[in-house]
Image (spheres, rainbow, N blue to C red):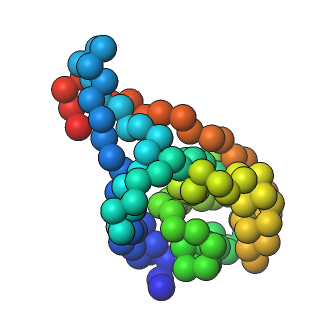
Amino acid sequence: MAAAACAIKKYPQMTQMAADDADGGWAITGRRLCYDGREGLMKTLIVQIKCKLGEAYDVAAFVVDNVAQCQIYSISGAYDLLAIVNLEDDVDPGVFVNKRLHSVPGVVETNTMIAFNAFTPSGKV
């Protein structure tokens, strides 16, 4: 798959949104609804990836095609790519990053954050 099409790839998981009645806003819960109808807890990782010079598009394509179902973006700044990865609850984030992402050809360094909840302004979806 061409790297430019990485962010367009269809994913079998959809985020289930739930109303937060306490403040009238919407929040993305930690639950995901899978394509086969199963519902389960998942972890969201936000990973900044620094690549070898000139290899960012190859790294992005490799990650999407071979490592994880994720959204991946080219970004400006100290890192070249930003990956948003949803892991099943039983997958260890540290093992995933160290064994799966660090082994990708062209990856030099990563910075990982774990997201807990995403919020949108009240009344907007």
Who's the residue at 41% across and 37% down the image?
29
Left or right: residue 60 versus residue 16 is right
Residue pictured at 21% horizontal, 32% vertical: 124
Going by the image, does 111 lie left or right of 5? right
Q: Is residue 52 visible from the viewing direction of this image?
A: no
Q: Quarter of the image for the C terminus: give it.
A: top left
**Of 7 and 76, the residue lying toward us:** 7
Q: Position of residue 74 (x, y in %)?
A: 53, 60
Q: Extreme top residue here?
A: 22
Residue 66 sits above or below residue 32 on the image? below
Residue 47 horizontal/vertical position (percent)? 64, 51
Viewer-side residue, 77 vs 3: 3
Q: Residue furthest front?
A: 38
Residue extending farthest to the bottom is 1
Q: Residue at x 72, y 60 (%)?
A: 96
The image shows a total of numbered marks equal to 0
**Along the horizontal axis of the image, is 33 left or right of 95?**
left
Residue, x 39% and y 73% (percent of image)? 9
Within the image, what quadrant is residue 13 found in?
bottom left
Is residue 43 visible in the rendered image? The answer is: yes
Residue 8, image x and y in percent? 36, 70
In this rendering, the answer to whether 81 lies above or below 46 is: below
